[in-house]
Image: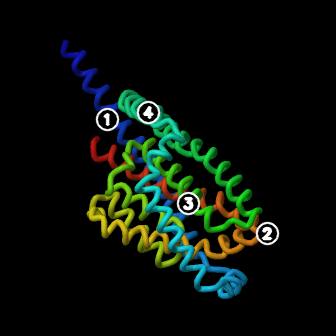
Amino acid sequence: MLQNKKRQYKASKYKASKYETSIKKELQIVSRQEKALCRSALKQDTPKWKTALTEKIPDKLYGNLQKAFCKAFQIIFEKGVGVIEKTYDKDSIEKDNEIHDFAFQLKADRGTLKKRRKDAKRSNLRNIAFTSVEGLGLGALGIGLPDIVLFVGVLLKGIYEVSLRYGFDHRSKEERDFILKLMEASVSKGDAWAACNEKVDRLIAGDHKPDEETQELESQIERTANAFAVDMLLLKFIQGLPVVGALGGAGNPVYYNRVLKYAELKYRKRYLLGLQKES
């Protein structure tokens, strides 16, 4: 009897150690990827040709673009969440999340954590394909600003799927604030990126209270819309031109990949840190 208890204790201790090691190694991967993103964001300079072309775009277009992004976020948050949820199997994703959690608790191996990561990335391939067709199609017709609601909808669809795969519900005001901050950081550069990224990490660490009030959420919508308008101004201007607009629309999948790469990384970090606290 005593020998059995000793073996059980050793097995339990080994499993706990394996559990902690698996999480630690995955967090090391997150850290390396974060450093790579940081280097890329901080060294990004706007090409001279892009600056020259952007300066020729009427100021009114920037204002319209910023308003269009604001309106897109507001419409989707107020009326479009249910519509977006119909485009993917929420129950299936939540069940997969529960299965992954159970498997990791049972086996404590990195394979389960890797599977979750791969599933999150695989689901984005369909969204990239859709936003590619949508952007190129509307761009060829010279449709720029009306494309924004669709584009933002696909972005949020991708982020919602990622959040669910890591066990987070996107419907609360707190989570919307987190998502908006993720999106703002993903399209920012230089010092602006560093400041936005710090806010995201503080929310993940629990060192900063999320914006809960509607007024503060509206301010974050404006900041996120502004970040997208600044970075996508030239592309959306080109997309609004007949025929050559397809060149502007081709930027949609590029931006989708950029936003979702950052969002997946931060949700993965948040999930792993949560596991680490529980261990």
What residue is rendered at 61% in x and 71% in y? 232
What residue is rendered at 56% in x and 76% in y? 64
What residue is rendered at 75% in x and 67% in y? 245
Label pair 2/3, CB-CB below 8 angstroms: no
Precedes in sequence: disc 3 or disc 1:
1
> Distance from label 4 to label 3 (Cα)?
26 Å
Label pair 1/2, CB-CB below 8 angstroms: no
Q: Tag 2: residue type?
A: Val
Residue that carries the numbered disc 4 in the rendered image: 91
Q: Position of residue 148 (x, y in %)?
A: 58, 63
Residue sitting nearer the eye, 105 or 83: 83
> Distance from label 1 to label 2 (Cα)?
58 Å
Residue that carries the numbered disc 2 in the rendered image: 244
Q: Position of residue 274 (x, y in %)?
A: 32, 47
Disc 2 residue crowd, few under 14, some 14–19, many 20+, Cα 10 Å? some
Residue that carries the numbered disc 3 in the rendered image: 149
- Answer left or right for 9 relative to 74: left
Precedes in sequence: disc 4 or disc 3:
4
Precedes in sequence: disc 2 or disc 4:
4
In what element is the residue under mark 3?
helix
Q: Position of residue 215 (x, y in %)?
A: 31, 69
The mark closer to the camera, 4 or 3, is 3
Precedes in sequence: disc 1 or disc 2:
1
> Distance from label 2 to label 3 (Cα)?
21 Å
The mark closer to the camera, 1 or 2, is 2
What residue is rendered at 70% in x and 70% in y? 240
